[in-house]
Image (cartoon, rainbow, N blue to C red):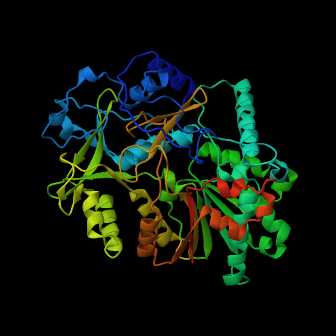
Amino acid sequence: MDSPVASAFLKHLLSHSFWRPQKRSVKQQTQRGLSTTPRARFNEQGDGPYSRLKKAAETGRSVSQYKEIEGTPWRPRQTYVPEEYISQLSNYDLITADQLRAKGRRPKRSRMAMREFIEDSLYNPAYGYFTSQATIFNPGTPFDFPTMKSGTDFNRTLDERYASFEDELDEQEPNDTRQLWHTPTELFRPHYAEAMARYLVENYRISLYPYNDLIIYELGAGNGTFMLNVLDYIRDTDPEVYARTKYKVVEISSSLAKLQAGHLTRTADSEGHSSKVEIINRSIFNWDIYVPAPCFVIALEVIDNFAHDVIRYDRKTGQPLQGMVMIDVQGELYEYFSPQLDEPTTRYLRLRDAAQDENESPAKKLERIGRTSRGWFDRRPLSQPEYIPTRLMGFFDVLQNYFPMHRLLLSDFDALPGAIEGINAPVVQTRFQRRPVSVSTPLVRQGYFDIFFPTNFEQMEGMYQALTGRLTRTSSHADFMRRWAFLEETATKNGENPLLDWYRNARVMTTL
């Protein structure tokens, strides 16, 4: 995100009055996020600057400019579509995120599948949210949990360090639109990574040692802290395994790849790992190297940012319609739904239906399209939107095709308070002047907002097993930590344990 431009853009939006957003319930706090406060503090029911920013980011137009079109496939959730665009739709190029990578500018006069739009918004090398703006909170000295009175004491200390960290960044370069977030690796350093390392070492020794090396692929390594903590632990506790360890980072962000390389050589202690590490600056979806050896693939808080498609069902026929994004000549964004499903969407629905035939009741299937066994319960022609993880399906294809002997260690969120309307819908959020600002649509200016999804672990397990033929085990974050962490290291004086109490909406899936 080009910060001066972004700041000017958001300040300009704040200076204009837009219509009020619809009333919604107050969002609950989530532990995954941009700050240690609730992800949306602004008053959604009011008309303050953050309400205006919210609506401006979603539409950029006043309500009087457009009228709703009845009897057409256009069903935008938050925007109104100019009627004249219907006839122009066939003249707009259908493009993909890959095609936009080399152009360096946001598209206009184009159409995209929703997953392609989200992929471009998050990962375009010129303006994507992660590739152009990546600041991960570093609390400095690890927290000394046994000296803290309680979890509340930890929260207070964390708030202080958060403010101090951003104060130091502002002294170097003030930035109203800094996109800052934290990870469990940073908050619970080194205990979180060491728990994962114990899992890796024990499973490696049981089934692979001494005939194979311990090969680890980490997707999206952030600051590189997890990598260093894991390697430190293996070196200090099991020199024999450390001698056989190879650690490979697959990082889509060039700026984070450079940061990871710098941290690897920052101290004499970390520099000792250099011969063990390879940082590969590319997207896992562009992977084309066959890896025949057994390996562990680690994806921690990664798949929540995998792009999704969106579908709605025709309530009369049950036919699924695929959500598309139209971008006009001025760069304005509109959503419409087409009965023509592309190959990834068709394939995912086929896999999902096959995997759930035995687990999903007929009543549940009817509920998805807005019906009950007794009839319709909503008179609208289309069901609520359902976001489907087509990019996650592509990730499992990569694992099966290029990492046939892999074991997956994956952790992410099974629920996200404050999501937009729909089944498996994302949270769409940015930060402005150190405050989180949420909006109610993914149709926002590309690169300015984080778009992250909850994971339906039951559906994911079924899809993973169908595509790879591998069995899995899923546990809560807390249960996994009880099995692999040394909990006395993160317990406070009153017995509370932030490592267990935080991330209650996270789960862990491993390959058996």
**Which quadrant: the C terminus?**
bottom right
Write the residue at 32% across / 23% down: 61
Up/down of 155 relative to 376, above or below: above
Q: As drawn, is 368 to the left or to the right of 511?
A: left
**Which quadrant: the N terminus?**
top right
Observer able to see residue 101: no
Q: Quadrant of residue 54?
A: top left
Up/down of 247 relative to 448, above or below: below
Residue sticking out furthest to the top: 15
Observer able to see residue 466: yes
Residue sticking out furthest to the left: 71
Write the residue at 80% across / 59% down: 489
Q: Quadrant of residue 91?
A: top left
Q: Position of residue 310 (x, y in %)?
A: 33, 51
Q: As drawn, is 261 to the left or to the right of 132?
A: right
Up/down of 51 relative to 142, above or below: above
Residue sticking out furthest to the front: 494
| Observer-nearest of 148 and 141 | 148
Q: Position of residue 499 (x, y in %)?
A: 70, 56
| Observer-nearest of 472 and 129 | 472
Q: Position of residue 459 (x, y in %)?
A: 41, 66
Q: Position of residue 229 (x, y in %)?
A: 76, 58
Q: As drawn, is 205 to the left or to the right of 467?
A: right
Up/down of 305 relative to 272, above or below: above
Q: As drawn, is 136 to the left or to the right of 419?
A: right
The number of callouts visible is 0
Write the residue at 50% across / 57% down: 414
Q: Quadrant of residue 346?
A: bottom left
